[in-house]
Amino acid sequence: MANSITFDTEAEIQDRAVLVSLVTDEVKRKGIDPDHSLHELIQLAETAGVEVVDSLRQNLAKKDPKFFIGKGKVEELRMIMEENEANTAIFDHELSGAQVRHLEEMLDAKIIDRTQLILDIFAQRANTREGIIQVELAQLTYLLPRLSGQGQNLSRLGGGIGTRGPGESKLETDRRHIRGRVDDLKHQLDEITRHRKLYRERRKKSEVVQVALVGYTNAGKSTLLKQLTDADVYIQDQLFATLDPTSRVLELPTGKEVVLTDTVGFIQNLPHDLIAAFRSTLEEVNEATLILHVVDASSEMREDQMAVVQSILVELGASNKPQIVLYNKKDACTPEQLQMLNSGEGYLKISAFDEADLLAIRDAIQTTLKGDTLTFRIPANRGDLVSLLYRVGEITNQEFDGSDSLYTVLLHKADYEKEGYLLQEYTESLE
């Protein structure tokens, strides 16, 4: 059994942090809203158990290669931290190992970047064996090229953010051990992925239709899963309240059952190492016949959050799947916000706690999964085809023509795509 790296957290103390934001020309070109990003960083820090005492912003044409922010701004940051008795600086960006080292030397404090903060939250949230392995792999992959910049961080007493998960024992000198641990974790994850693929194959053979809930973190996906299926899932008004995916059976109005899967929430600048480590889990979205895109309709950054979700779906290869956009938290919206939301086919304005809205979601799923209405002429001696008709759709009418039966069927799109070829020669002309 491989030796895991552990922490000494006996003397853990409260992190008091100053948040740092840098607005460069590149940030402006990308259209990133620095105010929203900083507000999100505050939420991330509070989710990680950090007390935010102040923030600092600088505008530069490009980042400083040595300190990330300007040297003068580093001195200003040092004074702000001393005034507020802060022991941590959290940057709303990804830092290099050298930048971390130089900042530590100037500030004599713990330096954390946005990626490390998100990884830390994931380390707190992971409960299943797969989730724990995925987070540790992402953390070690992130840390390995930055070890030269983590000296003081890893030797500081008190634990806290940036020290949960893989641990701090000899990280600075034990690169070989870390690489071995990474290889071991990848092997374990490959084995779990193999089992996941077997489960997927079983679902396909049993003709289970899967529907995936996706969305920005804290949009209300887990709440919807609980309300629609009575799932026993953890719900909290915080970022990444749930990490491990949960699947439950959802019964549609016609009695047909589908599997509804909740996935990990997305966020702006979701760390690449995290996407790579969680790819086998996120690829559950690719197995879904339908995607329910849950949106926090009350968020002022709604459109930007939707764009982030779509970009990650593109990266996963799932952007072309049928989608229903669920504008959640309508009860928290102003009349003006509600008026600005898209409406019509493929869009629903809902509250997860409104029974009528939950029924509307079930109806929308059922309607989207249905295909065309077709008529089939089935000979009297082909009872096997009649059974197939019941599997691929809903029989809405039956008539008799001599020894044949004419069945009018409202098709279930996914089921018909799998087995419909067996019925093609029995399809009646609609002319």
Image (cartoon, rainbow, N blue to C red):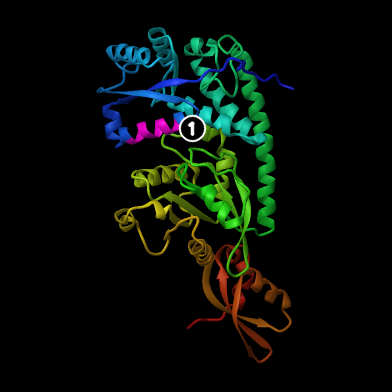
Residue 288 appears in view: no
Left or right: 360 with respect to 191? left
Q: Nearer the viewer, residue 426 or 362?
A: 362
Position of 241 relative to 372 (above/below):
above
Q: Secondary structure at mark 1?
A: helix
Position of 94 relative to 213 (above/below):
above
Q: Nearer the viewer, residue 185 or 40?
A: 40
- What is the quadrant of residue 36 in the picture? top left
Residue 22 appears in view: yes
* Residue 427 percent across, percent down from the top left: 58, 77
Three-letter amino acid code of the residue under disc 1: Thr
- What is the quadrant of residue 59 in the picture? top left
Residue 431 on the magenta segment: no
* Residue 173 percent across, percent down from the top left: 58, 9
Residue under the point 52% across and 64% down: 359
Specify the segment rendered in magenta: 36-44
Residue under the point 60% across and 19% down: 167
Q: Which residue is outermost to the bottom?
A: 402
Left or right: 150 with respect to 379? left
Q: How many marks?
A: 1
* Residue 146 percent across, percent down from the top left: 49, 16
Position of 53 relative to 283 (above/below):
above
According to the image, label 1 marks what residue? 47
Quadrant position of the N terminus in the picture: top right
Q: Nearer the viewer, residue 379 or 352?
A: 352
Name the chief secondary structure element in magenta.
helix
